[in-house]
Amino acid sequence: MNCIDLAIKAAKGKLTDQEIRDAFDREQKIRAEFMDSGRTDNLDARVARKIAQEAMAKKIEQARQKRAIAQNIIVRNRLNARLAQWQAEGMSPVRALLASAEGSQMGIKGARDSMDARQAAFESQYIGDTMAHIEREKPHIFGLMTDNGFDNAVTDELFQLREGGTPGKTGNSDAQWLAKVLGAAMEFSRTDLNRMGAAIGRLDGYAGPQSHDDLAMLRVLRGEWTAEIKPLLDMDRSFPDAEPAEIDGILSEIYDTIITGGMGKDSAALHGQRVSPSSMATRLGLHRILHFRDAEGAIAYRDKFG
């Protein structure tokens, strides 16, 4: 009886045969990755630790999904009740649905409390408070915001706001100060949204969303873009669940997603028509986030494709 058969017997039906075989396959792949990279010291311990990390990540993701389902049920019931109320007060079903997104001036109670209004309120709170802070403490910084060198310094200082980072690395006190202000604002918005039901993890060294210039990307072939960005990325953070041989394919899919607007087919951009640049946060969402190796990598990408 081999190891797989022994594991199947020990599982006593709690896991399917295929789940057990998949687990053994994953263990072998992890072991091969460590060996291929030359990290063979304490190999068994390394493999066990990696497997434990993946198992914990899977448990966390399953818990997050259950939480999201429960939240969606609550929100859906609340929305249905609101739509029913508005229809009872004279709105058509279509008008009620539109009002939930963009608001209404029909004089119906609660009809102005739309998704659009709430988004504007949160943006005003987070962005407005930050701008007021700058105006109050260091108003001259507004004059520096169009300077590319200052922008790069702020990006670098934001990247240093992590464990093991070196704040003040740039020697630019204004950039260091602004990075702290922006970092605090982003952390406040993250925790505030989590309090309301989101599940946004903290990213050390997060320097803000990475933008993409779709026209600049269209000037190069998919493979050229992949070759340009790949050396700039933190592979472990960007592709924790992928095999090394799969990374080029994943990056190619990301290229297609960005220039097609996520539609997976020809878009206006592919035919030479202008569409707005895409944001990693809005276009890729949680499907795949690209983490740059360091601030220099993020800046180099932004200068060419951002």
Image (spheres, grey):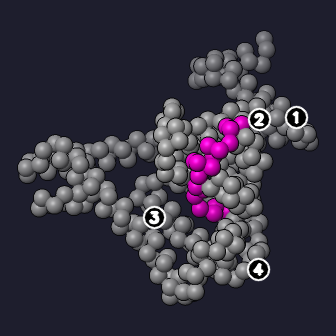
Neighbourhood count class around disc 1 (C-alpha, 10 Å): few under 14, some 14–19, many 20 upward: few
> Earlier along the polypeptide chain: callout 3 or callout 4?
4
The span picked out in magenta is 205-223
> Earlier along the polypeptide chain: callout 1 or callout 2?
1
What is the CA distance from the residue labelled 1 to the residue labelled 2?
11 Å
What residue is shown with label 2?
Answer: 244
What residue is at 49 percent from the left and 44 percent from the top? Answer: 273
Please provide percent x and percent y for residue 195: 44, 61
What residue is shown with label 1?
Answer: 36
Kind of element beneath mark 1: helix
What residue is shown with label 4?
Answer: 171
Kind of element beneath mark 3: helix
Viewport quadrant of the C terminus = bottom right
- 303 versus 137 height, above or below: above
- 251 versus 102 height, above or below: above
Front disc: 1 or 2 = 2
Q: Nearer the viewer, residue 290 or 161?
A: 290
Q: Nearer the viewer, residue 290 or 279?
A: 279
What residue is shown with label 3?
Answer: 192
